[in-house]
Image: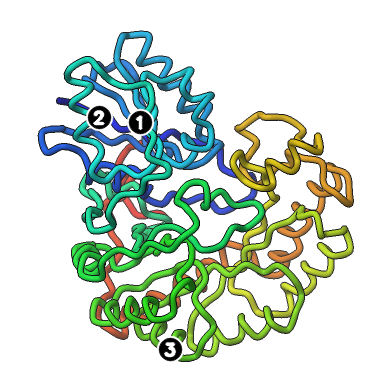
Amino acid sequence: MKFKLIYPGWEKLEGQTIFNLPPHGPVVMAAALPDDVEVEFIDENVEQLSTDDYPDFVGISMMLTTQIKRGWAIADEYRKKGIKVIFGGISTMLHAEETMGHADSVFLGEVEGRLDKVFDDFRQNKLQKIYNFINNPPDMSLIGPARRDILKRDYYYHKGFQMVDLFHASRGCIYNCYPCAVRYLGGRGFRPRPMDKVVEELAGIDNNRLFVVDNSLALDTEWEKELFRAMIPLKKKWCSHTIEDKPEVLDLAAQAGAWYVYQAVFDTSDYIKNRIKQYHDFGIGVEGTILLGLDNQTEDDILRLIDFLLEIDLDLAEFTIMAPFPHTKAWDDMKKQGRILHQDWNLYNAGNVVFKPMHMSPERLQELYHYAWDTFYKDEPQTKKMFNLISRVVTKEMEDGTFKPRRRDLIDVSFGKKIDKQPE
């Protein structure tokens, strides 16, 4: 059976450095496919998609809300020809009811141990409209190594630098943050993979650079330390979301190859300032993630926060506007309060104001978002700060003998064609 798995493209935010990471959801999904399924994967962000073909079955994997309208359009094209389409992924789960209008089937939840049934149903022409496993997560021991072989590796370079591969060691989260849908998607709990499975997959990833995409690594101290000890011999270089700010944890993280972390900067407290310093004391870079538009933020709060960021020596900063995604507390509250401006899902990209802020107009919040980007990168552009961070990891790789020279035979991702020389 020929199964075509598609990751829809989306419009990138204006002014930000554009690079593409190999998507994680599709390669995890592909690992759970039946053995007799031949999969072709298309990442529309880096290659052109043709819908003129006739695969047996089409799957559309969507992570972001900004992908869903494009995903629906792709599905409509195939279904016009009588080809069945199944949707899965995070944004499918968040927008399941709407997506069902463009699908023969939607899969909700985690795939391990479930896809044999789906494909048996397809072969027998008994495909169900919905496969719902949201509240029934699989045994974590069933999660095998992701199918990174389906990726076209040459597309995932940026100016000659090989981008990170994505990897996860756990699922779920113990928290229930206001704008976050993780509790709905994966349950409010921490579910680690067996450590031997984690090490097996890590050891088999050819790329030395990783993004550990777990919701947080700061959910269980002993597990966290066990993970870092297991990673030390592998000599990977990786970034992740938050790490606990305990010296023994940070020391192990640094030994395990921690390159930089994404750290939420939510106020101007000494706690945040000291946390950034702690990371740096252990040689770990920091990309601040700053969410604008929360109900407790006034204009003055945002302006003070931007000034504060210039004082705390962040390596990078990423500013986003809060988006009230479905199945979050933010969505429920704002829907009741009549503060949702529209449901144009293409604009739910964390760069556009899609709700009425509590303490300012939507237009003013949009202005402050652009002001934040412009101010933080005024003296040193984002490309230069990113180059500094990349140089740091290359230096570490050269010190421990894991550096691989950049490739000269690359792909121009704008046109999907090979280019004769590496980009400058």
Apparent side of residue 299 relative to residue 49 in the rendered image (left or right)? right
Apparent side of residue 264 relative to residue 293 in the rendered image (left or right)? left
Q: Which mark is residue 339?
A: none
| Image height of 356 relative to 306, above or below | above
Residue furthest out toward the left: 36
Q: Mark 1: which amino acid?
A: Tyr
The reply to whether callout 1 and callout 2 are in contact (CB within 8 Å) is yes
Apparent side of residue 276 relative to residue 303 in the rendered image (left or right)? left
Residue 281 screen position, x and y as percent:
54, 90
Local SS, label 1: strand
Mark whose residue sits in front, 1 or 3:
1
The residue closer to the viewer here, 389 or 34, is: 34
Disc on the earlier residue, 1 or 2: 2
Label 2: few (<14), some or many (≥20) within 10 Å? some
Disc on the earlier residue, 2 or 3: 2
Q: Which quarter of the picture shows residue 3? A: top left
List the residue tagged with mark 2: 118
List the residue tagged with mark 1: 131
Residue at 43% over, 63% down:
190
Q: Identify the image quadrant of the N terminus.
A: top left
- Between the residue at mark 1 and the residue at mark 2, the CA separation in whole angstroms equals 8 Å
Local SS, label 3: helix
The residue closer to the viewer here, 278 or 46, is: 278
Q: Which quarter of the picture shows residue 267? A: bottom right
